[in-house]
Amino acid sequence: VQLVESGGGLVQAGGSLNLPCAASGSLARIKGMCWYRQGPGKERELVAAVTPDGNINYANFAKGRFTISKDNAKNTVSLRTNSLKPEDTAVYYCNAQIITYTSSFALNFWGQGTQVTVSS
């Protein structure tokens, strides 16, 4: 199973980016999918999540600016980031809990990360 993110880049403050993440491989069922980020010198933190039962949760800093959406048919999760601030600069990681064809329980998978840089 692989998670591949894209969509990162350099953007001015106030700008927007869309970060898609696609899951592929021997996956039987995707349960939860979410986005994390890790800024320079900071710990990795949760940005937004779609829970296995479809509920959506956001970190306080993401509320009102970021939108997470999951497409079950395409095995994708996207993060739309609006009104970006310099403090949003970070590597953004896709994360998913996936039941594979060889596992009887959900395993945790990470993407390689995509860099978002917001200039002031």
Image (spheres, grey):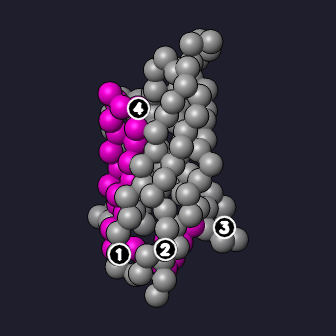
State whether residue 57 appears in this view.
no
Q: Tell me which label, 1 or 3, sits earlier in the chain.
A: 1
Q: Amino acid at mark 1?
A: Gly
Q: Residue at x 35, y 69 (%)?
A: 16
Q: Position of residue 24 (x, y in %)?
A: 51, 30
* Residue at mark 3: 42
Mark number for residue 15? Answer: 1
In this view, 7 is above or below 98: below
Q: Tell me which label, 4 or 1, sits earlier in the chain.
A: 1
Q: Residue at x 46, y 26 (%)?
A: 30
In front: label 3 or label 4: 4
Q: Residue at x 62, y 12 (%)?
A: 102
* Residues drawn in magenta: 66-90
In front: label 1 or label 2: 2
Mark 2, Cα crowd under 10 Å, few <14 / some 14-19 / many 20+, is few
* Residue at mark 4: 75
Q: CA distance from mark 1 to mark 2?
A: 10 Å
* Residue at mark 2: 10
In this view, 32 is above or below 104: below
